[in-house]
Amino acid sequence: MMRHYYLMGSYTFTLSPESDIQPNFLFRMSEQFRPQMDMGVKYMFREDFWAGISYRTKDVMIASLGARFENLFFGYSFDYSFNQIQRMTYGSHEIMIAMKLGSSTRRYRWLDRY
């Protein structure tokens, strides 16, 4: 097992009351000092639909789509590599299904006391 270190961040810019754009990055490095970085941007419409594109060092492009229905989230992502492994894999697919449990509005209720 190797230890890995991660640094990530994003910021949401509001374009209109119904749409946002969110640039993001992820920097990771192992104990052998092999850094890797993902940089991307995601467009969100009404917080119900989103689409994004990212670039990962080592020549990988990532496209993603997603939708929310009540407390269920569905997503699809496709990674396309521009290096030699592409001839054998033709890219990779990822399907995501998530469920949000509980309400985040009550989460920080204690902050109102101060």
Image: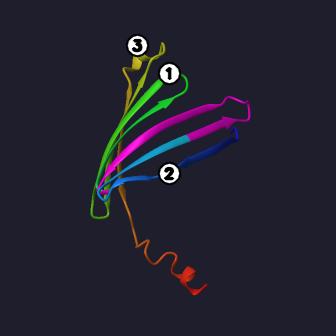
* Mark in the foreground, 1 or 2: 2
Residue bearing mark 2: 11
Write down the region rendered in magenta. 26-47
Density class for disc 3 (Cα within 10 Å; few <14, some 14-19, many ≥20) is few
Give the CA separation, mark 2 to mark 3: 36 Å
Q: Which mark is residue 87?
A: 3
Q: CA distance from mark 1 to mark 2?
A: 24 Å
Please report the residue visible at 50 percent of the width from the left and 21 percent of the height from the top.
59
**Mark earlier in primary sequence (2, 3):** 2
Q: In the picture provided, is 18 more to the left or to the right than 22?
A: left
Q: In the picture provided, is 28 more to the left or to the right than 70?
A: right
**Residue 68, how many percent across, how many down?**
29, 56
**Disc 1 element:** loop
27 drawn magenta: yes
Q: Secondary structure of the magenta portion, mostly? A: strand
Q: Nearer the viewer, mark 2 or mark 3?
A: 2
**Colour pattern of the rendering:** rainbow
- Mark 1 or 2, nearer chain start: 2
Mark 3 or mark 1: name the one nearer the start of the chain: 1
Q: Nearer the viewer, mark 3 or mark 1?
A: 1
Q: Which residue is mark 1?
A: 59
Point out the residue furthest to the front here. Answer: 16
In this orientation, which residue lies closer to the viewer: 114 or 108?
114
Contact, mark 2 vs mark 3 (Cβ under 8 Å):
no
Residue 83 rendering spot, x and y as whole percentages: 48, 15
Q: Residue at x 64, y 44 (%)?
A: 6
Query: Quick one: SS at disc 2?
Result: loop
Q: Residue furthest bottom?
A: 113
The three-letter amino acid code for the residue at tag 2 is Tyr
Residues at circles 1 and 2 in contact by the CB criterion of under 8 Å: no
Vertical placement of residue 110 versus 78, above or below: below
